Amino acid sequence: MKPYATSLISNEDSNLFEKIERIIQEIPDIDFSEQKRESRRKVLLSCHMIARALATFFPLQYHDGYCGNCEHSWLTTKTGNIIDAYPVGIMGGPILIPTGYAHPFERLYKENVLYRVSGIRSQRNVDKVIGIMEKTITKLDIKRENSKKEMNEWKEHFVDLMKHIGV
């Protein structure tokens, strides 16, 4: 049975979501603890890292803010639909939420600046996720939709942004 929401989502968004689903299912668990040895705090893969990494491979925009009252990052498609690659407090994912149809989940996502996730250390973690994701995409034989040139432009933009906000 196909859910009603599928009638609200373009084929392009649906196909993109299916690729992301496959990638997320194949990515191994990643522990960044070695980068935080001094604090002995375990640093795991986060929604912030995943959203930024996926946006380098596909025509998606990542957003930082809140999902309910939790700091969160998610993606939007060209048509504005929400792809939450790593949903808050849910076992499973990603999820695709059609927007503009009074969907109750849509109101949970509020964009806001999250300074905690925009530092150089965060970028190193994102770079590591991008490398792992690139191997996963190659293994799954999924066509990337952003070129390496666009990926480099994104990184340059990120570095310029960090300089601008003084990080």
Image: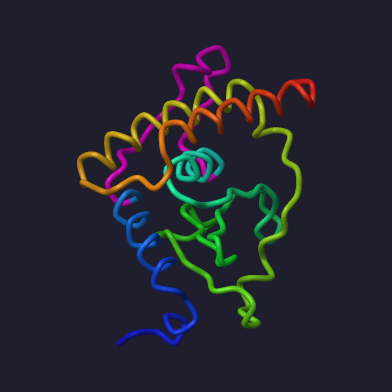
For the residue pair 45 and 144, the one nearer the viewer reads as: 144
Residue 57: name its quadrant: top left
Which residue shows up at 65% across the image and 34% down it? 117
x, y percent for residue 39 = 58, 17
Residue farthest along the right direction in this orientation: 165
**How are the colours assigned in the image?**
rainbow
**Left-right relation of 95 to 136:** right
Magenta span: predominant SS is loop
Residue 27: say if magenta: yes
Residue 42: say if magenta: yes
**Left-right relation of 142 to 46:** left
x, y percent for residue 22 = 29, 54
| Quadrant, the N terminus | bottom left
For the residue pair 13 and 97, the one nearer the viewer reads as: 13
For the residue pair 128 and 80, the one nearer the viewer reads as: 80
Which residue shows up at 41% across the image and 29% down it? 31
Q: Which region of the structure is painted magenta? A: 25-47
Residue 80: name its quadrant: bottom right
x, y percent for residue 20 = 37, 54
Which residue shows up at 48% across the image and 52% down it? 86
Which residue shows up at 50% across the image and 31% down it? 126
Picture layout, residue 161 above or below residue 71: above
